[in-house]
Image: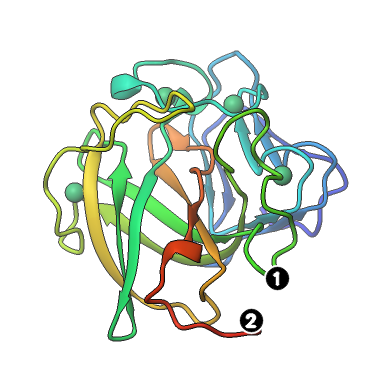
């Protein structure tokens, strides 16, 4: 599916669907008054994958499973509904070394050990199309929208050097990470990803579809990132 800026939120029909494509080959979905993409209602619609899209500056969430606002992570991802209400990844730490970013966090455990995690520069980054806080909606964290695709990896693949289970405690928003897997991956530092930028992520399982966007990891804390006054 290819589309330009949407005039109204994109409503995904019953799956399986693919909105976007591999890498950064996806759609531009921005400036809606509501969500960027609303997936299903409460009918348990499943398997809408959303990959490689540029989603930003929408009035509500970038991706909303169930059309009900932020759906926080639950223990062992036992909840049911649209896209299985798949838990989103959690980003825990980003450091830079030798031109690479070392990214640590947790992702939902795939049934066959294959969970695709996509990383994006969030729209509330410095110079982005939205303002910090735009995606809180009553929560303590800003959940962001994925404005610029950065990279993807498979949790549990050879590129993921952390084989432990997730040790991140339940947060103030009630996100419970029990049952998720920890990851550590190294990617080349994307051009233009600098101090002041924030990262958000999605998880995708082929039989469930894609999660909502994760809370931001705010790289104002990443003092090892190169400081630039302007973004490319
Ligand atoms: Ca928004
Ligand atoms: Ca939701
Ligand atoms: Ca869930
Ligand atoms: Ca892992």
Q: Report the residue at 38% width, 52% height from top.
A: 117
Horizontally, is 155 left or right of 78 in the view?
left
Is 79 in front, or is 143?
A: 143
Of 199 and 31, nearer the camera is 199
Residue 192 falls left or right of residue 124: left
Residue drawn at 20 percent across, 58 percent down: 160
Measured in 3D between alpha carbons, the distance from the residue under mark 2 to the one under mark 1, in whole angstroms, is: 7 Å
- Residue at disc 1, secondary structure: loop
The quadrant of the image that shows the C terminus is bottom right
Q: Which residue is mark 1?
A: 127
The one of 148 and 81 positioned closer to us in this rendering: 148
Q: Label 2: which residue?
A: 231
Q: Taking the image as four quarters, which one is ligand 1 found in? A: top right
x and y, in percent, of residue 150 in the image: 48, 68
Contact, mark 2 vs mark 1 (Cβ under 8 Å): yes
Going by the image, does 27 lie left or right of 32?
Answer: left
Query: Going 51% across and 73% down the picture, which residue do you hit?
Result: 195
Residue 125's spot in the image, x, y percent?
62, 63
The label on residue 64 is none
Of pointers 2 and 1, the one earlier in the residue sequence: 1
Where residue 87 sits, quadrant-wise, is top left
Q: Secondary structure at mark 2?
A: loop
Say whether mark 2 is within 8 Å of ligand 1: no
Relative height, residue 194 to residue 181 (above, below): below
Q: Could you say where residue 6 lies in the image, as x and y percent from the top left?
A: 82, 50
Give above or below for 115 relative to 14: below
Mark 2 residue crowding within 10 angstroms, few (<14) / some (14–19) / many (20+): some
Looking at the image, which is closer to me, 218 or 72?
A: 218
Q: In the picture, residue 63 is in which quadrant? A: top right
């Amino acid at each position: 599916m290819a589309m330009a800026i949407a005039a109204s939120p994109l409503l995904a029909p019953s799956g399986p669907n693919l909105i976007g494509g591999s890498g950064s080959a996806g759609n531009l979905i921005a400036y809606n008054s509501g969500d960027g993409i609303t997936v299903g209602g409460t009918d348990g619609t499943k398997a809408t994958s959303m990959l490689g899209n540029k989603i930003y500056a929408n009035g509500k969430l970038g991706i909303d499973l169930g059309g009900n606002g932020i759906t926080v992570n639950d223990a062992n991802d036992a909840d049911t509904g649209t896209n299985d209400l798949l838990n989103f990844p959690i980003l825990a730490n980003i450091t830079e070394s030798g031109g690479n970013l070392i990214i640590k966090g947790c992702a939902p455990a795939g049934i066959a050990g294959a969970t695709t995690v996509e990383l994006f520069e969030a729209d509330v980054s410095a110079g982005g199309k939205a303002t910090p806080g735009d995606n809180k909606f009553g929560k303590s964290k800003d959940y962001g929208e994925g404005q610029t695709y950065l990279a993807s990896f498979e949790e549990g693949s050879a590129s993921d050097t952390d084989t432990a289970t997730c040790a991140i405690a339940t947060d103030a928003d009630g996100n419970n990470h029990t049952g998720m897997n920890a990851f550590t991956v190294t990617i080349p530092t994307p051009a233009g990803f600098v101090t002041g930028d924030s990262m958000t992520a999605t998880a995708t399982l082929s039989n469930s579809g894609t999660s909502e966007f994760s809370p931001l990891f705010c790289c104002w804390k990443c003092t090892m990132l190169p400081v630039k006054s302007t973004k490319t």
